[in-house]
Image (cartoon, rainbow, N blue to C red):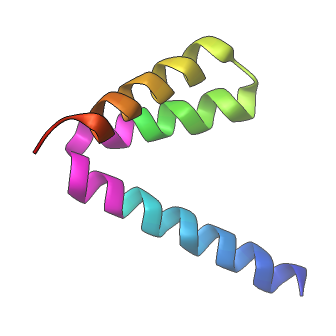
């Protein structure tokens, strides 16, 4: 069971990365990676920068 759950999580992460890159371009992918890296390293600065950039990309008109 844990192997299946891990596979599902990895698959969802890959789908999220591809969607972000397709919808928001390279800057969206960089912001997502910064957000994930900041969360894993418990670095508030890099995670915060990633979150702010991703939020700005999500809220832009058009």
Q: Who's the residue at 59% across and 11% down the image? A: 45
Choose between 54 and 33: the one closer to the eye: 54
- Is residue 22 in the magenta section? yes
Within the image, what quadrant is residue 57 found in? top left
Q: Who's the residue at 37% across and 26% down the image? A: 53
Question: Is 57 drawn above or below residue 47 in the view shown?
Answer: below
Q: Who's the residue at 56% across and 70% down the image? A: 12
- Is residue 32 in the magenta section? no
Specify the segment rendered in magenta.
Answer: 19-30
Number of numbered discs present?
Answer: 0
> Left or right: where does residue 51 sit relative to residue 19?
right
Q: Main secondary structure of the magenta part?
A: helix
Question: Is 57 drawn above or below residue 24 in the view shown?
Answer: above
Image quadrant containing the N terminus: bottom right
- Residue 60 x/y as whole percent: 20, 34
Image quadrant containing the C terminus: top left
- Residue 16 x/y as whole percent: 45, 61
- Residue 9 x/y as whole percent: 67, 70
- Extreme residue toward the right, this view: 1
> Left or right: where does residue 8 sit relative to residue 4?
left
Q: Who's the residue at 62% across and 68% down the image? A: 10
> Left or right: where does residue 46 sit relative to residue 26?
right
Question: Is 24 drawn above or below residue 48 in the view shown?
Answer: below
Within the image, what quadrant is residue 11 found in? bottom right
Within the image, what quadrant is residue 54 found in? top left
């Amino acid at each position: 069971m844990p192997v299946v759950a891990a596979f599902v999580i990895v698959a969802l992460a890959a789908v999220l990365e591809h969607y972000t890159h397709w919808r928001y371009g390279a800057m969206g992918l960089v912001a997502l990676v910064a957000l994930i890296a900041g969360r894993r390293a418990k670095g508030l600065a890099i995670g915060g920068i990633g979150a702010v950039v991703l939020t700005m990309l999500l809220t832009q008109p058009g």
